[in-house]
Image (tube, rainbow, N blue to C red):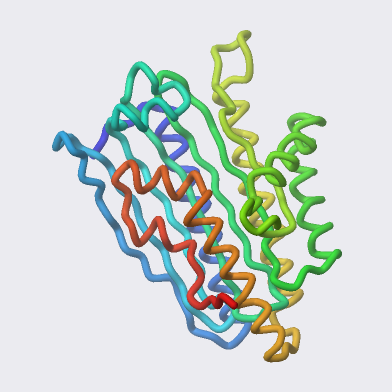
């Protein structure tokens, strides 16, 4: 087991506690749909190349009546980046040692009218310490009401800390969650942020300030997404709606396999492959 300092332990504890609350809410939704689906949890350990403790995580997976496939993963890992990969990571160019803890969630819904979603928040330490993450909504069949409510809740979370950050972080999500070879966005956006560096008091945003913002992003997600699911999960749908959903999922898979930085980070740092690729949909089509 890797040794954690107070900041690392606090972040890890929060991500694991958030996982528990999200999974409980998703299971409650399944119960409301007369489904007995529950999460199955699979612990895994990271094998560090130098035989040092590398940490690990827990993959949570549920397949139900409302959530066709939802994965909620938490991990806490440490070690050394490869020399080449270290050059691409914030603060690791001259010292490849790293620590990372976080939560990652992707939900693919059974009903095409219910939006899929991605949420991730994380804390990393190299020669710098920073938070990153965000959430974005990915409806196969968009509803303006759902999009507006999702963005409004994230805007409120941002405004509690900085009146300007929602504009910056929503634009970052718009730019990031884009599929260049298709010329389309993979969803209707949300927020994305990275490299919220933690400074000493008086020198910039502190660990406590950035951690408080990241916690509020998690709370915003837990507040709004279940409401959207309950709003749409019983909507009647046609075979044409289902085909539209499966084709959209193909685009989603393309983004995650080609462009997503989190996928690459997990594979480059010896993460659990099944946990990393839990973001892929259970079914998809390509025309």
Which quadrant would the N terminus be assigned to in this image? top left
Residue 5 in the image: state x and y as whole percent: 36, 26
Note whether 147 is above or below 27 in the view shown.
above
Q: Give the camera-side residue of 287 and 175.
A: 287
Q: Give the camera-side residue of 41 and 82.
A: 82
Residue 134 in the image: state x and y as whole percent: 62, 45
Residue 115 in the image: state x and y as whole percent: 68, 69
Note whether 257 is above or below 176 in the view shown.
below
Report how many numbered discs are placed on residues in the image: 0
Note whether 232 is above or below 129 in the view shown.
below
Q: Give the camera-side residue of 241 and 23.
A: 241
Q: Which of the 4 image quarters holds residue 165?
A: top right
Q: Give the camera-side residue of 245 and 170.
A: 245
25 sits to left or right of 271: right
Residue at 71% in and 83% down: 241
Residue 176 in the image: state x and y as whole percent: 64, 44
Q: Which of the 4 image quarters holds residue 255?
A: bottom right
Which quadrant would the C terminus be assigned to in this image? bottom right
Residue farthest left in this picture: 51
Residue at 58% in and 20% down: 206
Residue at 82% in and 68% down: 143
Residue at 58% in and 34% down: 194
Q: Which of the 4 image quarters holds residue 239?
A: bottom right
């Amino acid at each position: 087991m890797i040794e954690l300092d107070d900041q690392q332990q606090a972040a890890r504890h929060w991500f694991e506690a958030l996982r528990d609350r999200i999974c409980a809410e998703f299971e409650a939704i399944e119960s409301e749909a007369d489904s007995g689906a529950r999460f199955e949890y699979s612990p895994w350990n990271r094998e560090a190349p130098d035989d040092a403790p590398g940490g690990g995580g827990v993959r949570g997976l549920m397949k139900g009546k409302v959530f066709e496939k939802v994965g909620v993963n938490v991990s806490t890992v440490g070690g050394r980046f490869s020399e080449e990969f270290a050059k691409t990571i914030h603060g690791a160019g001259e010292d490849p040692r790293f620590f990372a803890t976080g939560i990652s969630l992707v939900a693919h819904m059974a009903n095409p009218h219910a939006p899929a979603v991605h949420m991730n928040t994380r804390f990393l330490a190299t020669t710098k310490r920073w938070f990153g993450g965000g959430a974005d909504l990915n409806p196969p069949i968009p509803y303006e009401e759902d999009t507006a409510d999702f963005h409004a809740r994230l805007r409120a979370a941002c405004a509690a800390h900085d009146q300007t950050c929602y504009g910056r972080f929503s634009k970052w999500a718009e730019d990031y969650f884009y599929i260049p070879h298709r010329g389309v966005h993979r969803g209707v956006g949300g927020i994305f942020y990275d490299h919220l560096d933690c400074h000493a008091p008086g020198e910039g945003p502190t660990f406590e300030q950035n951690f408080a913002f990241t916690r509020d992003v998690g709370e915003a997600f837990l507040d709004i997404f279940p409401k959207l699911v309950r709003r749409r999960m019983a909507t009647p749908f046609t075979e044409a709606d289902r085909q539209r959903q499966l084709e959209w999922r193909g685009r989603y898979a393309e983004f995650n396999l080609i462009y997503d930085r989190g996928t690459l980070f997990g594979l480059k740092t010896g993460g659990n492959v099944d946990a990393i690729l839990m973001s892929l949909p259970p079914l998809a089509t390509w025309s």
